[in-house]
Image (spheres, helix red, strand yellow):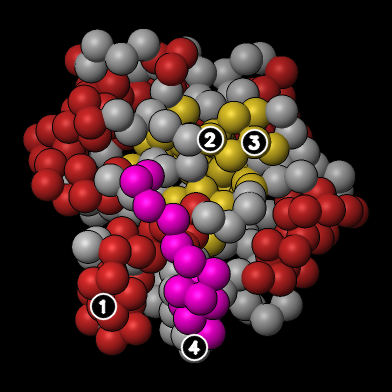
Amino acid sequence: MQFKTAKGVDVPELGMGTHRLYGKECKNSVLNALDIGYRHIDTAQIYKNEKEVGDAIYASPVDREDLFLTTKVWHTSLDHDDVLHSVEESLRLLRTPFIDLLLIHWPNSQYSLQQTFEAMLALRDQGKVLNIGISNFPVGLTKEVIQDLRMPILTNQVEFHPFLGQFDLLDLTYDHDFLITAYSPLAQGQVMNDVTLISIAEEYGKSPAQISLRWLIEQENVVAIPKATSREHLESNFNIYDFELSDDHFEQIDNLEKNRRIVSPTFAPNWDE
């Protein structure tokens, strides 16, 4: 397993996303991922699968200290006390005394960011949360968090794939020592149908998905959390460490149009801010 480091914290650069995984399927997928070698698992309160993720981690022979576990506070639970109470419930469901990374899942202007972060920092002081961060924050709001509020975020988890760039945000990571965690890194399967990615993949004997993941993790300060259900897909996503993209191929992917946003619910922020 390879790592990316920010603020002195090593984060496995390839993790497993669990969005829309439920029940036994979720538990089995996480168990398979841990058996394959994944050491970074991502969940969220709104996913309604923290119990299954926790059960899998508990049943796995992998030591808890060797895992990097992320969960997220939903955007309607950002009041100071709601953060505290909801994270206690997450800890109970996940069957763990601590969470490696706690994120604000989506920004919500109805709540004071300062108060939300005060609750997160209190949890960190208690040892229940080791690191804090944000998710789905556009560049302007990210600057507010790190420059105005001076919050020590470890990551901003955002949609990032060959058809949606996050290069302005990436530039910000270099000056402020945080990571980008790429969710939907395979554009929810759309990478499999792109002629450029198919052509590049054929040259390496890989799949377009593997090429896309390789493109992401070869970028400084980027980790990726593809979701997969079957053991076959989990293994395929993990099998990206036996090759490197040439400069030409990397540039070809860079030059794909980067305006295809897939995840943008009604409560999403203004992405251009």
Q: Position of residue 64 (x, y in %)?
A: 40, 14
Q: Position of residue 1 (x, y in %)?
A: 42, 32
Of callouts 1 and 2, which one flags the residue occurring earlier in the amino acid sequence? Answer: 2
| Alpha carbon separation for disc pair 3 and 4 | 29 Å
In the image: residue 32, left or right of residue 57: left
> At label 1, which amino acid type do we have?
Ile
| Alpha carbon separation for disc pair 1 and 3 | 31 Å
Residue 255 disc label: none
- Name which residue lies at 64% across and 36% down: 5
What range of the chain is rendered magenta? Answer: 241-255
The local secondary structure at tag 1 comes to helix
In the image: residue 112, left or right of residue 192: right
Which residue is situated farthest in the right direction here?
A: 148
Residue 3 disc label: 2
The local secondary structure at tag 4 comes to loop
Q: Are marks 1 and 2 in contact (CB under 8 Å)?
A: no
- Depth order, front residue of 50/210: 210
The residue tagged 4 is 257
> At label 4, which amino acid type do we have?
Glu
The residue tagged 3 is 5
- Depth order, front residue of 150/39: 39
> At label 3, which amino acid type do we have?
Thr
Callout in the foreground (1, 4)? 1
Q: Is residue 17 above or below residue 208?
A: above
| Alpha carbon separation for disc pair 1 and 2 | 27 Å
- Which quarter shows the C terminus? bottom right
Is 86 included in the stretch rendered in magenta? Answer: no
In the image: residue 273, left or right of residue 183: right
In the image: residue 211, left or right of residue 81: left
The residue tagged 1 is 198
Q: Quadrant of residue 206?
A: bottom left
Q: Position of residue 51 (x, y in %)?
A: 27, 29
